[in-house]
Amino acid sequence: MPLLVNGRRVRLPLSAAELVRAHPPLEERARLLRGQSVQQVGPQGLLYVQQRELAVTSPKDGSISILGSDDATTCHIVVLRHTGNGATCLTHCDGTDTKAEVPLIMSSIKSFSDHTQCGRLEVHLVGGFSDDRQLSQKLTHQLLKLNDREENENHFPIIYGIAVNIKTAEIYRASFHDRGPEEQLRAARALAGGPNLSTSPLAEPPHFVEHIRSTLMFLKKFPSPANILFPGNKALLYKKNEDGLWEKISPGS
């Protein structure tokens, strides 16, 4: 199946290293992204994506203009965008079920696409580094050297997080203080679904320990959140208010 890179058809399969050698602009764009300073993104217009979550929207969205995620060490952040209508999907993958996640990403973009519209799919992949357990390498092989730095003989990722502007398609390095509604509940879902607290403890960002501590305290307080926090098995609904902040929707409103 052919892949479009910079508007050209590329025959698969290609290794990551072969793809970079065949298309030098890919390495140059990665270098430019690494060289950016990290932008602190506020909550207005932001939809934050946690580990094992996926979000998709389009420029027609009146509430969301930025999709973003961070804290990616061995994880990968994937952005898929349709150039015709601007529909954009961002997901934070940790390798738990990649085989199922890829078709879900594709179907989410297709749900926003009109088949009569011209355009192509652009994919952006950020994350991973040369970790000791080689978990990152299993995902992107030799391409990982583009996001790796070494300090005191330990390896760290250069980029931990990115944001994508839905309106302009700009992708930039980012970090986030506000991570949307029910942050601890959503983090508990990811933590409870895996065997390890961290796949790369030496490379985690400074706030990682506090994040894990607060998530564990949440699990201790709500050992069965499905029964307590979702009465009647009803979803928790939120919307962006006039100030661009998340606001819980009361049942029946």
Image: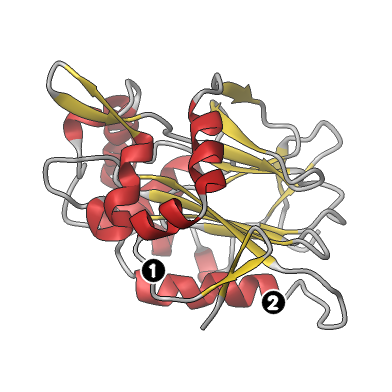
In the picture of the structure, the residue carrying the numbered disc 2 is 110
- The quadrant holding residue 202 is top left
Numbered circle sitting on residue 168: none
Q: Of residues 205 and 229, which is closer to you in this image?
A: 205
**Left or right: 61 as drawn, with respect to 149:** right
Residue 115 in view in this figure:
yes
Position of residue 34 measured from the top left corner of the image (x, y, whole percent):
48, 29
Assess disc 2: are there few (<14), some (14-19) or many (≥20) residues with their C-alpha within 10 Å of its C-alpha: few
Amino acid type, mark 1:
Leu
For the point 58% across and 68% down, the residue is: 234
Element marked by disc 1: loop
Q: Earlier in the sequence, mark 1 or mark 2?
A: 1
Quadrant for the C terminus, please.
bottom right
Q: What sort of colour scheme is used for the picture?
A: secondary structure
For the point 33% across and 70% down, the residue is: 97
In the picture of the structure, the residue carrying the numbered disc 1 is 14
- The quadrant holding residue 84 is bottom right
Q: Of residues 152 and 56, which is closer to you in this image?
A: 152
Q: Of residues 221 and 215, which is closer to you in this image?
A: 215
Position of residue 18 measured from the top left corner of the image (x, y, whole percent):
37, 59
Amino acid type, mark 2:
Lys
Position of residue 20 measured from the top left corner of the image (x, y, whole percent):
44, 52
Position of residue 85 measured from the top left corner of the image (x, y, whole percent):
83, 64
**Left or right: 5 as drawn, with respect to 60:** left
Q: Is residue 202 above or below residue 10?
A: above
For the point 20% across and 38% down, the residue is: 200
Residue 223 in view in this figure:
no
Name the mark nearer the viewer: 1 or 2.
Answer: 1
Q: Of residues 183 and 36, which is closer to you in this image?
A: 36
